[in-house]
Image (cartoon, rainbow, N blue to C red):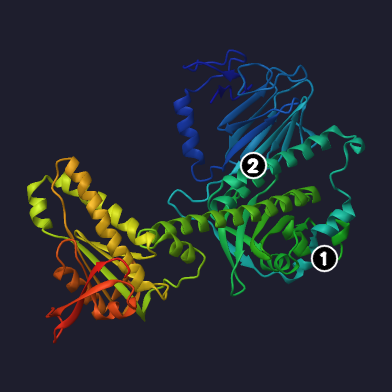
Amino acid sequence: MHAACPSCHTPILGPQVPSTCPACGATLQPIAEKGAQAAASTASIRPPGATLVLYSPDGLSAEFEASGLVTIGRHYENVIVVADREVSKRHAVVEETSEGWVLRDLGSSNGTFVNGRRVDTLRLASGDEIRIGSSRIVFRLYRPEAGPHGETRSIAIVQAPSLTQVLASAPALTADEGETFPPAWQIEDVEVLRKDYERLRIAWRFHQEGGLVTSEEALYQRILDLCFEFLACDNGVVLTPQRDGTFEVQVVRSLESADEIRVSETLLEQVEQTREGVLSSDAITDHRFAAAESMVARGIRSVLAVPVIARETIRAIIYLDNRSRTSAFTPKDLDILNNIAQQAAVSLLNTELIAQIKQEEATRAQLERFLSPNLVQAASRGELDLKKGGSLVRATILFSDIRDFTRISERVPAEEVVRMLNEYFEEMVEVVFDHQGVLDKFIGDAVMALWGVPVAGDRDAVHAVEAALEMQRRVAAFNERRARQGADPIAVGIGVSTGDCVVGNMGSSRRLEYTVIGDVVNLASRLCSLAEGGEIYVSEGTAAALGGAYDLQALPPQAVKGKSRPVTIYRVRGDAA
């Protein structure tokens, strides 16, 4: 920030402030003392912050944060340097006072213009356009959304029945005014071309940036940021319609110091009902609104509102207003904002699609932990019901278990045990999936797999026994590799049982597990315990379901835990007979 003489406004540069002004001889105060006095005198009425955006004739722009006093001129020592011979070395200043931000011309040769009118001293309003030489400077006020103690501004949606008399939809305004974007050969006013270019540039920026936004709130916030950049807005609100007919505020931006922003409920309802953008100006100066009630007209000034429509549903309404200037918005602004709203709708759908894809990927990754690839695809297509709860089904359950695993784990380091188990499980899970099974869980060194759930088939028991035989072949190959590495072999016993059980997602809402429970599950586990290394035991129910497809040896009835009488079991001796 540059200091300046309070009398002649000559900039005072350097780390130390001299006692007198080198230009006019006025007494100067140290910056710290002057700043402290200013802070003490204006603490309670300090105006909002501000920015000055310089647009040069070559199409470049630069934004300056206004703080205290901003000098403007051709000399390089100014805060805003305008390299133009029509601009004086010290042309004008914008300074912050207790009444607001004030622009003062410093006796320049060619004058300072605000909104087309030459001025000497003027209190600036947000959106005012300062013309100095061939360059223009747009003054913008901004105000934080939350106060110093974190309090936020409230939104009051008020009823204003007479407001409908001063509203017109986008198509009507465009037709009346004829303010469309004409072809190049019809453009005669270069200034109009500049303004139109700026509108289209902002729309193009949103087109580029909108697709990068990943949340609905961030998207709406970006819209308001752009609106405040190219429109003379005092307030901006994005609201979403609710099922009960009310509107919920999503994001807010404001330049005003009032604690409450008032939004017309009638205007919101009109946008919602007509599904068209609305532009409203001061009825006193607008011939189209001559029939409006004067009190309502004076209170409206300039309002712009457009809907964001995605899949035939109004997702949000973008509301902008200017409470101090009439005709602050034009039909071209309405066209651009409608275009931004359409792009926002596409961005919303893309954001939702991305979220859906991520959710499906997460679900698929979770399902791939225990379902075979074909069942994962069916679940992804919504063909499987994996909701919380259970149902009674007929299924085939397989348990496999490494014999003497405790002894093996005591003889080798823990890291080697983990590595061996991971290699073993990789082989077993691949077999389960290859034979259309479902991996239920790992229980220590045991594997539990299912057939017949969540989709039942005529050959579920056959697939389970085929998997059991393949598991034993894989274990033999696994032991050959271990022998070459000098490691001890392992032996696996397998039990298979077929019968009725309850299947479904079970557990809490925070952690569900797709599994089965019932007597048939317990029996499969008991058969696995009875089987020696390399053996496969099946229950009477499984033997009946196989229909003679495998060579089975009936064993003497065995007493198993949980059964009051001995059960008939069979040993699988080989492939299909």
Distance CA(mark 2)–CA(mark 1): 41 Å
In the picture, residue 446 is in which quadrant? bottom left
| Residue at the farthest top position | 22
Residue drawn at (14%, 41%), measured in percent from left and top? 486
Mark 2 or mark 1: whose residue is earlier in sequence: 2
Residue 84 visible to the viewer = yes
Q: Is residue 511 visible?
A: no
Residue labelled with disc 1:
292
Q: Secondary structure at mark 2?
A: helix
State the residue lying farthest toward the bottom. Answer: 564
Tell me if mark 2 has few (under 14), some (14-19) or many (20+) residues whose alpha carbon lies within 10 angstroms of its own. Answer: few
Q: Nearer the viewer, residue 536 or 43?
A: 536
Left or right: 168 as drawn, with respect to 370: right
Residue 145 in the image: state x and y as whole percent.
52, 50
Q: Is residue 45 left or right of residue 91?
A: left
Q: Which one is in front in this view, the residue at disc 2 or the one at disc 1?
A: 2
- Residue under label 2: 208
* Residue 398 in which image quadrant: bottom left
Query: In the displayed structure, would residue 89 be above or below residue 70?
Result: above
Q: Residue furthest front?
A: 577
Q: Position of residue 314 (x, y in %)?
A: 66, 64
Q: Position of residue 342 (x, y in %)?
A: 70, 54
Amino acid type, mark 1: Ala
Image coords of residue 106 (percent x, y): 70, 24
